[in-house]
Image: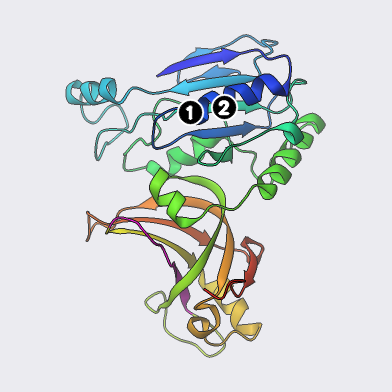
Amino acid sequence: MNQYAFEIASTDDLNRLIEKLAATKTEVRQVRLSHLKEPSGLGWVTSVPAGNNIAVVFSLGDQAQIDEWYKRVRKPFGKMEFTAAPIAVPPTLTIFVQNKAVNLEQLKIPNGIAVTSGYVPTVFHQFNTKDEQKRKEEATRKPAPNEKLDPAAQAAADKIEAFLKMQKPLAPEAILENKFEGQATVEFLVSEVHTIDIDSIFMPGLSHAQIIKANVSGTKDGQEFLVTVSREIATRLLRLGIENPAEHFRGKRMRVSGTVERFEPPSAPSKTIYKIHVTSLDQLENIRKPADGS
C-alpha cells in the first residue's frame, strides 16, 4: 500500500485534495477524521517522528499486488487465518483534526464519499480473516466511550462527532453500491420487520430481537440492507407501547446511526448483507412517515 503525507496551509488546500479524491474512478472513496494531532505510524511497521505537522495522509492499496502476494504467502500467515484474498485499501484521505490548518466547519464533502471517524488505514481494507471483526475495530482506532483523552483530543473528538451528525444521511442504495462499511447514519423506508424468535423462550413482558429490512431499489439480487435490534432494545420499545413492530415500523422512514458491517451468510455465500446492530435507543434518531407519502 502507498501512503502520501501532506502539509497544508488552509482548509482550502484540504478541500482541493477532497475534490481530487471525488474525481477518482473507483467504487469506494472515503475520508477518515482522526481526533489526533498528527500520525505516529503508517501501516504495521512504519513510524513517523513526533512534530511532523502532517495534516492529511492519502492511502491507496494495490489489489493486483495483494492477489499475487496471497498466491505465494504461507497460510496461515502467522496468526492470521485467511478465508479469501484480502481487499486493497480504497482511495482514502485521513484528516488530523487537531492540525491548526483544519477547520471542519469549512470542510466540503461531495456526494459519493463515505466519511467516518478513524485512523490511517493499515495494510488492507478488508483482511478476510476469521477474526475480521476484531481487526476492523483495531484498524479504526476511534476513542472508546470510556477512553480518557487530553483536552485537545477530546475537543477534536467532539468536533468530529458533531460534524458526522450534520452530514446528510446515507441511503441504503449508496451503501450497497459503494460497499460501504463504517460509522454512518442511514435513512431508509422500512419494507419488512421480522422477529428473531430463536434467541430465547418467550416470556411475558419481554420481546424477541427484531430485524428491520430496508426498501432498496435498483440494486443487484442478493444484496440487502437491514437493521438488527437487540432483545433489550426491542423490549424497551415494547414497554414504550410498540407491541407490534411490524405494523408500527412498516412503511415509515427510519434514520439509524451505528456501524455498518458487511456479512455473507455461510448458508448463502452469494448473498451480501450490510447491517447496523442497534443496542441503544439513541441510535434510532428519527422515525417518521415519509413526507412524500411513498
Position of residue 64 in the picture relative to residue 154 (left or right): left
What amino acid is labelled 2 in the image?
Glu
Please name the residue shown 49% across and 13% down the image: 46
Please name the residue shown 51% across and 85% down the image: 247
The residue under label 2 is 19
Q: Residues within 10 Å of mark 2 (few under 14, many from 20)?
A: some
Which region shows up in magenta? 208-220
Corner quadrant of residue 47: top right
- Give the answer, above or below, for where 182 lies relative to 103: below
Q: How many marks?
A: 2
Position of residue 260 in the picture relative to residue 34 (left or right): left
Number of the label disc, if any, that sits on residue 146: none
Please name the residue shown 22% across and 54% down the image: 269
Position of residue 112 in the picture relative to residue 216 (left or right): right
Does the residue at mark 1 contact the one at mark 2 (Cβ under 8 Å)? Answer: yes
User: Quick one: SS at disc 2?
Assistant: helix
- Give the answer, above or below, for where 293 lies relative to 221: below
